[in-house]
Amino acid sequence: MTAASVVVATCNRPRELQSCLRSLLAQTHPPTLVVVVDDAPGGDHTPAVVARYAQLGPVMYVEGPRLGLAAAHNRGLREVTTPLVAFTDDDVVADEHWLQRLVEAFASAPDVGCVTGKIVPYELVTRSQVLLEGYAGYDVLS
C-alpha cells in the first residue's frame, strides 16, 4: 500500500495533541511519518509531548513560522517525502481506519488529486456542543 505521512498543526494545546498523536499511531495503515508543526514555539509542553510519542513511533517536532494554519502546513510539507500527505489539527482524534481509507481513495481512480473525510464531533454532551453541531456542523447536506 502507498506510503503516507501526516502533518499536524498545533498551537499550545498539549493535552489535545496527546490524544491526536495516540490516534495517529494506532492507525491500521501506519503513517510513515507524523510531523507536528508547533505554530506557537517557545514553550516546553508541546516538544515534551512530541518527544514522548516519538519513542512510540515515527513522530517529529518542527517549529512553525507563527503565521497560521496554511503556513504551518507548508512548513510540515518540507519534512515529508512520501507520495501522500494527510493534514489534521491537534484537536482531532482520528478513527483507526482514517489513513487507510484516505490511501484507498487515492488508489480508487488515476485522476484523484484530493480527498477529504467526514468530520463528526468528539462528543455532544453540553448544550453548546449540541447547538454548534446543529447550526454549524460538518455533516449537513446542503
Image: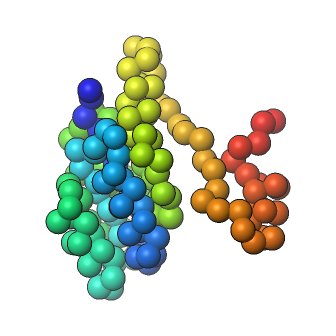
Residue 36 image-quadrant placement:
bottom left
Residue drawn 63% across the image and 50% down it:
120
User: Tell me, what colour scheme is on the image?
Assistant: rainbow
Q: Residue shown at 50%/64% (left/top)?
A: 91
In the picture, measured across the screen, residue 136 lies left or right of residue 92, that is right
Label count reads 0
Q: Is residue 10 depicted above or below 82 in this figure?
A: below
Observer-nearest of 119 and 88? 119
Q: Nearer the viewer, residue 37 or 75?
A: 37
Which image quadrant is residue 133 in? Answer: bottom right
Residue 69: % across, % down: 48, 60
The correct choice, above or below, for 77 with respect to 64 in the image is above
Identify which residue is drawn at 43% across, 17% down.
Answer: 108
Q: Nearer the viewer, residue 73 or 87?
A: 87
Q: Residue at x 21, y 72 (%)?
A: 51
Q: Position of residue 142 (x, y in %)?
A: 81, 36
* Vertical position of residue 128 compared to residue 99: above or below: below
Tell me if residue 48 can be seen: yes
- In the figure, is residue 34 to the left or right of 97? left
Q: Quick check: can you spot residue 69?
A: no
Q: Is residue 28 left or right of residue 112?
A: left
Residue that extends furthest to the bottom in the rendered view of this protein: 43
- x then y, percent, for residue 89: 47, 59
The quarter of the picture where the N terminus appears is top left
Residue furthest left in the image: 55
Q: Quadrant of residue 118?
A: top right
| Residue toward you, 96 or 21 | 96
Is 68 left or right of 46, judged from the image as shown?
right
**Residue furthest to the top:** 110
